[in-house]
Amino acid sequence: MRKTAFILFITLAASVYAQNAKNVLFISVDDLRPELGCYGNTQINTPNIDALAGQSMLFTNAATQQAICTPSRISMLTGLRPATTGLYNLEDKLKTNHSHIISLPHALKNAGYKTYSYGKIYHHSDDDPNAWTETPWRNVGSHYVLDHNGDTPPTESADVADSAYPDGKIADAVLAKLDAIKDQTFFLAIGFMKPHLPYTCPKQYWDQYDRNAIPLASTDQPNDIWDQSLAQWQELRNQYTGIPEIPTDLDESLTRELKHGYWACVSYVDVQIGKILQKLDDLGLRENTIVVFWSDHGYKLGEYGDWCKHTNFEVDVRIPFMFDVPGKPSGTSRRPVESVDIYPTLMELLEINNYPDNLDGLSLSSLLDNPDADWKQASFTQYPRYGGHMGTSIRTEDFRYTEYRASDGTLKAAGELYDHTVYDANNPLGVEYNNVVLDASYATELASLKEIMEAGWTGVKYGASLDVISLSDNSVSLRINNISDATTLKLFERIDDGESIEILPGHITTETQEVTINSISSGKVYYYRLKVMWDENNYAITPEISVAFENRISLIDNGFFDAPLSGTWSPRENNGGDMTYAITDNILTSTVNSLGNNFYNLGFLNSKISSFSNKNIVVTFDAKANTTAQLRLTLDFDNKQYPIIDISNSWETHTLTYNDVSSSYFQFKLWLLTAGASYEIDNIEVYYDDSTQSIDPATGEGSVLNSVSTSILNTQVKNLFDFYTFKIGNSHKLISSEPFSLLEVYSIDGCKVITSEYNSATSAQFEHGDLSKGVYIIVLDKIASKKIIL
């Protein structure tokens, strides 16, 4: 929520927040791009970071504010964008330009936390000195172990211990510090310096890779871009010996050496992180410590024939980012998040209220509970260019749009538009090559992105939105959400492919919570969006929502459900009603226009067989509805009318018991009951092995798999366990709570499409390959299953 009052800061006694306070371990890695196992790279060795990801909320669409060290770190630590602070340069310091700003560590210190900085947190170690309980520690020495006669080569491999190089020294110092502060309430910030140039680390990490097997990047550049969109890789050329002046003179041998060095440094840092996390466990601190993992920006390793960072391209601004919060679920979120979101998130998680009310970021707390929760439309990144030009880039879940403008606002070139819905298994980093800004087929997307760009980051910050709350034969009612302290609201309507025009001017005020639009015609598609204004230059434009009355049944499954929605969805009785199913954020919305004002928002989760023995079966599920709804569960082999279940407007668990079930295979089906019609919304398939005729929950004898096609069910059940999956480019990764030996993937019609064997694995990754779009079932050891959607 947006704060409306400025908060004065006073130093509080530690006891105010200490009773229920959590520690914070903040891990920063310099120049680390999301080229990690948990982000889809199967060749690089990062087991400790991957393990952390497995118990964290992993953000796959995270952006830094500017792809260079100083501004990116200041923006993260202050929650303010470079455009807010005016700090865009490497030489800038917070203490010199804005000594009044209360940074994240300063706010924690004011709240009674002990705050410590080890390694590289601010770019300048003497910046923001009042934020820390002790003087920041950066006693790391040289990046070189060997004597190079005054030269500064870009790589070095020495057969020495980890502590011979800076990051090993940082890790050792942190281990000792954890011993010393284990009884304190602390914010411990750790800044590792690799894989920043020079790529120098112990030989054992170089030995993990075959240099000739490391893939090299394409040097192709995007089409139709402004001539200043890319950088000149001065950092590599100007600071290190042996690097040619002309990019085309960088031969394959040196290119491989450089990338080999980068990967070696990543694995070196991974081991140091593992030591610290293990220490946290050994001291019994893990259950009371929030762990944040973050990189200051991405990095180019030859992409576009360029090196280092310093651009607005995905490869430079996308960062690895995760939050491990005790008591919060692990998972993966595609929502567009940013470095400035870290500060307000920690304040909310730690229940600290005394911090600046003007932060540019938003708390990620809702995404830490639900990775698919409503969220802002886009992240914003900037990078200044020569001659006073500014590049600004926005990233939604599916697109990146970038503009470069002169100081007078003149647009340079046509801009850049990249479609990130086009996945490439060979490009897990999402390196952008195809600029479609001039492609007429993207005109609608381009217009929408330009509106977001025009509204700016304040416009997207508060997540204003519209929801459909009811439909009738000729009207639609909308709910207005998250307008905060706006001064003006304007509602726009577009019909089919027509122009968007303001409707109901003067009838919608900031007090309006719901609005009804009449005279809706059948056979047309209506689009609505809201313009939320704080002043003429400070406004938000919500995403369009669509409303359609069509004489057909439309099924949309966006994959937010893990298991409960399955099988063939079709209404048993239609009775002439026009019906649309849609799934959004774990809510099954069924709209039937023949039912007048009966509009159902039905949430349905966790349907399962909770116990089974001697043909006695207990079925449980959780449900809620925004209006009164009635459900009925049936068995497919009998005609019994089981009791009707009333669903309330809050989540409740419902339990149904069935005795003396006489069939070896059957389906439980759940129906939504309406006036004169009933609609199947879920089914659970159960198979009893003919030789067993029962399922013993203690031994697992028999067979049961939920939400799997019948032909997959003929297996012996030995154990039931859980696992979760997340999509990475053109592949899926899964992490299991129990070891498994066999992974199978089935199409929804029961055809096996992938089989892989493992040796007591707890994680795996498989490529989609030639699989077509659709619903698939992942089955582990024939006893645990999960539905995915490609």
Image: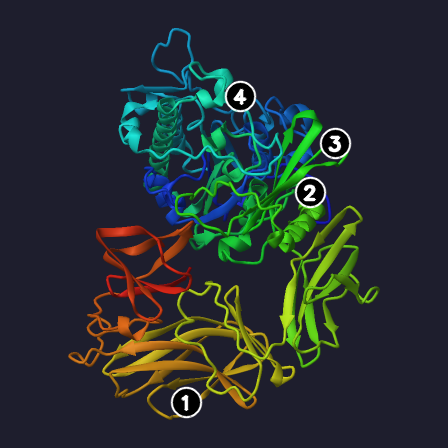
Closest to the observer, 135 or 643: 643
Q: Earlier in the sequence, mark 1 or mark 3?
A: 3
Q: Label 3 vs label 2: CA separation?
A: 25 Å
Q: Position of residue 435 (x, y in %)?
A: 56, 43
Q: Is residue 677 left or right of residue 387?
A: left
Q: Earlier in the sequence, mark 3 or mark 2?
A: 2
State which mark lies toward you, 1 or 3.
Answer: 3
Give the residue at x 39% y 40%: 36
Q: Secondary structure at mark 3?
A: loop
Q: Which residue is mark 4?
A: 234
User: Dots 1 and 3: beta carbons under 8 Å?
Assistant: no
Q: Which residue is mark 3?
A: 407
Location of residue 403 (image quadrant): top right
- Amino acid of disc 3: Ser
Q: Earlier in the sequence, mark 1 or mark 2?
A: 2
Label tally: 4
Residue 497, compared with residue 664, is above or below; it is above
Q: Position of residue 706 (x, y in %)?
A: 33, 71
Q: Secondary structure at mark 2?
A: loop
Coloring basis for residues: rainbow
- Amino acid of disc 2: Asn
Q: Position of residue 359 (x, y in %)?
A: 65, 42
Q: Label 1 vs label 3: CA separation?
A: 71 Å
Q: Which residue is mark 1?
A: 642
Callout 2: 10 Å neighbours few (<14), some, many (20+)? Answer: some
State which mark lies toward you, 3 or 2.
Answer: 3
Q: Label 4 vs label 1: CA separation?
A: 74 Å
Q: Label 1 vs label 2: CA separation?
A: 56 Å
Q: Secondary structure at mark 1?
A: loop
Marking on residue 358: 2
Q: Residue furthest left?
A: 691
